[in-house]
């Protein structure tokens, strides 16, 4: 949470992303918590920076969401240097869509189907 509260731009972008999810009725399928964790993932992987404008944060999140396919290549908040860890591959055996927490034990998208 410290990473998100470090700048108002990130907080404002998260609020706008929340409204975007609700307007498109995606808040039940995807959820704001998972989207906020995705913002943390982008910060950790140096795709977002704290001095970035709100518009640029929104644009970056949308671009990465559009280009990613978590049903084939899941992601994890776990610190890793190489390709997807074995825990992501293991999670794909049980879940169609994979986005794991830092411990690789909780799948934020465990309730999401490929159709969603």
Image: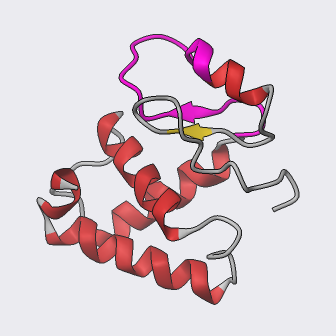
Quick one: which residue is furthest to the front in this view?
105
- Residue 33 within the segment the image draws in magenta: no
Is residue 14 left or right of 3 when viewed as pictured?
right
Is residue 17 left or right of 1 when viewed as pictured?
right
Is residue 11 left or right of 24 when viewed as pictured?
left
Quadrant for the C terminus, please: bottom right
Quadrant for the N terminus, please: bottom left
**Residue 32, position in %: x, y?**
50, 69
Quick one: which residue is furthest to the right in this view?
115
Q: In this view, does 96 lie above or below 33?
A: above
**Residue 68, position in %: x, y?**
65, 42
**Nearer to us in this view, 86 or 26:** 86
Residue at the (69%, 28%) spot, across then down: 91
Residue at the (42%, 66%) spot, across then down: 58
Is residue 43 left or right of 36 when viewed as pictured?
left
Q: In this view, does 36 lie above or below 101?
A: below
Residue at the (81%, 40%) spot, across then down: 96
Task: Please report the bounds of the magenta region as a residue range.
Answer: 70-87
């Amino acid at each position: 949470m410290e990473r998100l509260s470090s700048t108002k731009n990130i907080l404002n972008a998260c609020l706008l992303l929340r409204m975007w999810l609700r307007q498109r009725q995606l808040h039940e399928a995807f959820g704001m918590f998972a989207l906020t964790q995705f913002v943390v993932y982008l910060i950790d992987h140096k795709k977002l920076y704290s001095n970035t404008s709100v518009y640029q944060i929104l644009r970056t999140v949308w671009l990465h969401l559009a280009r990613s396919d978590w049903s084939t290549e899941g992601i994890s908040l776990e610190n890793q240097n190489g390709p997807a860890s074995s825990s992501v591959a293991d999670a794909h055996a049980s879940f169609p869509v994979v986005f794991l927490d830092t411990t690789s034990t909780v799948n934020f998208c465990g309730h999401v189907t490929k159709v969603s």
